[in-house]
Image: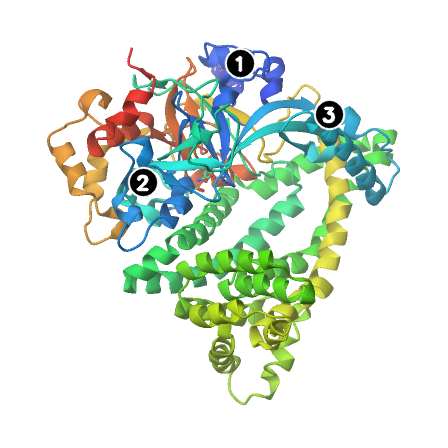
Amino acid sequence: MIRKTISLLMIAVILSISNIYAHEGMWIPILLKKYNIAEMQKMGFKLSAEDIYSINKTSMKDAVMIFGGGCTGELISDQGLLITNHHCGYGSIQSHSSLEHDYLTNGFWAYSKKEELVNETLSVRFLVRMDDVSTQVLTGVLDNMTEEQRHRIINNNIEVIIEEATKDNSYKALIEPFFYGNQYFLFIEEVFTDVRLVGAPPSAIGKFGGDTDNWMWPRHTGDFSLFRIYADKDNKPADYSEDNVPYKPKKHFPISIKGVKKGDFTMVFGYPGSTQEYLPSFAVDMIKNKINPERIAIRQNIIDILIGDMNSDPGIRIKYASKYAGVSNGWKKWQGENKGLKKLKAIAKKQEQEKKFQAWVNADKSRLAKYGSILTDYEEIYSVLAPYKIAEQYFFEAIWKLETIKFTARIASLSRKGAGYTQKDIDGLKTYAKKFFKNYNLSTDKKIFNKMILMYRQNAGSDFMPDFYDFMIPLKYFKVSEEVALRAYTEFYFDDTFYLDEEKFNEFINNYTVESAKKIKATSSYKLYASFITSYLTKISPVTQTYSAKLDSLDRIYMKAQMLVDTSKVFYPDANFTLRVGYGQVDDYEPRDGVFYKHYTTLAGVIKKDNPKIYDYNVPQKLKDLYATKNYGQYAENGEMHVCFTASNHTTGGNSGSPVINGNGELIGINFDRNWEGTMSDIMYNPDQCRNISLDIRYALFIIDKFAGATNLIEEMTIISE
Ligand code: ARG
Ligand code: GLU
């Protein structure tokens, strides 16, 4: 008996310790002082909440930015030099690449500022300040309003607040809902649009292991690239000009080359994109069992075609490298997510929570009146919604992303203008088309088109078929199989769509008149595109929209109620691509019984994976030489070159490129991925299995210094070696 008491006691102690070090959560910078800083300091953080976020003095937030459309980056010199992931800079590196200058394969380094490459469409955004504006946003909102009334009032309030916030400055302002609209925050941002490419390692370093290693640990990827922000003479944002000068930031991160040990405090400061931690079991069930399997299957088919084409022709490989990476990234993540949800028994866990929730509701009459039907409402909505959501997936994943459809959509928008088009519209389309054709291979598009049109037909659900399948290609009258009929149709479609040929497109656009709009509308591509849109707008979206308004309201009420059930628990809001802090520690893990994963990898592992026959594993000779001579400079640890490490920070897509910071506020790594076993953390976090994967900053410095010889860049940085 005594033994049992002791072990229970021990468990309680262990539980309370692990509670202190709970790593789940993406926290709001202005609330750290209230909720997190004490715990962070206990875990080894030596600075204050004000050092992370402050509007009265410079703080870390002045060195962290949204990079491009969906990544994070951070400043590492007082001359506007920033670091992010290779996969975040990929689009830019790729856009400067051709067979003659293949920066994807060979890397790119600017040995002086003059050599940096201008990016027309790249921008970065810094947070100037954030404020809780819930009271102002919700002024005039009453509990008994309809969702439309509520939205109207909220939108009006938001407009007023934004106007006020930006009237005397050149900042951008936006307001985002938190906790499903129970709270609102205002974000004031400064946007820089002259951002130049400074350095990128070869893909065989920056994307080492490619899509095989993606989402996996152990990992050996040198996933970083360097850019520089330029400003006008007054250090203010300005579009590209030769006269612009390097931006002088208020703050940049010092870089520690002292190394990381298991148990060290880590903090990730960046822009997590989206999580869904508070969904009911019915929603998790729909995602896991209905949506994920379909989208995995769609992308599997696209991937098979892309791999075949890319392997057969280096030109196609360059054209489709970036697109392929995007497709395969989600495909692999959702598979990991489903495995993780299954292993965690996530649906059963949610059901368990819901039972408790219902008991809490039932215990009180006024709760029963307010929250009594939440769970049954959810159940009903998700059962009705599921087939529509599957059809919607097919529309957006299989059809809407087709290259021919995207291009047609762009051209159709010109034709819709009728006589009202301007020269600017024509020029805009020309620019778009130039980029489109640079990365376009018609026969690849054709194969994917054929497969997707067939998959939609077979799997999207018979209620959601566009009339195209009947009127353009009346499948039921064919004596051959649908497969054969659609193959013949595909040939016809690509012959008929004249503008998919660059020369014909140029001739067409250079001679564009009002009459040309008719020519567009006569193509089978336009007809197919219009038919799919009509079917989406009449058969799918009216239902998904009605229900999503209902869900908005239910989610908001359910969230509020969940917070009332346990008032002692501090909740963190789901990620919404606003600046957040995650904290944890350098840590290893056990993916399965009997398997142990160390918390770091080394260059020796890179060399072991070397395989000249596989593009992503073909280690550059120079790197092999550096390894052979152990020429690691000041960046080695006990004679070894560390490459990546894992830690227990709660992160998600968008956190790529985020600074990983030690207890002294110094940069020790760049976040770039999660482990496969932990990808379900977007829906349910598990401290034993969820790890973020970071590039050890010393590997980046070693590559810049010893591999590329870009000592000009090292000299700009603030390096802390003791
Ligand atoms: N999985 C990482 C993320 O979600 C990296 C993706 C890029 N790398 C790749 N091999 N596709 O963005
Ligand atoms: N690679 C992801 C990104 O680009 C981060 C990995 C994750 O989802 O945690 O944002």
Q: Quadrant of residue 55?
A: top right
Element assignment for label 2:
helix
At horizontal 51% and vertical 78% (from top left) the residue drawn is 496
Is residue 106 depicted above or below 40 in this figure? Answer: below
- Earlier sequence position, callout 2 versus callout 3: 3
From where the camera sits, is residue 512 visible? yes
The spot of residue 450 in percent (x, y) is 48, 72
Disc 1 target residue: 39
Mark pair 1, 3: CA separation: 27 Å
Write down the quadrant of residue 205 in the picture. top left
Quote the CA–CA distance across marks 1 and 2: 35 Å
At which x and y percent is residue 591? Answer: 39, 37
Task: From the image, tell me which residue sits under label 2.
Answer: 206
Q: Quadrant of the C terminus?
A: top left
Q: Amino acid at mark 3?
A: Val
For discs 1 and 2, the disc positioned in front in the rendered view: 2
Mark 2 closeness class: few <14, some 14–19, many ≥20 residues within 10 Å? many
Amino acid type assigned to the residue bearing label 1 in the image = Glu
Depth check, front residue: 688 or 232? 232
Q: Secondary structure at mark 3?
A: loop
Give the mark nearer the N terminus: 1 vs 3.
1
Q: Residue furthest bottom?
A: 479
**Residues at discs 2 and 3 in contact (Cβ within 8 Å):** no
| Rendered position, 330 above or below 174 | below
Amino acid carrying label 2: it is Gly
Question: Which residue is situated farthest in the left direction here?
Answer: 629
Please give left or right for residue 406 compared with residue 372 in the image. left
Q: x, y percentage for residue 16?
A: 53, 16
Furthest toward the front, the residue is 243
How many residues crowd around disc 1 within 10 Å: few (fewer than 14), some, or many (20 or more)? some
Query: In this rendering, would 398 be left or right of 94?
Result: right
- The tag on residue 133 is 3
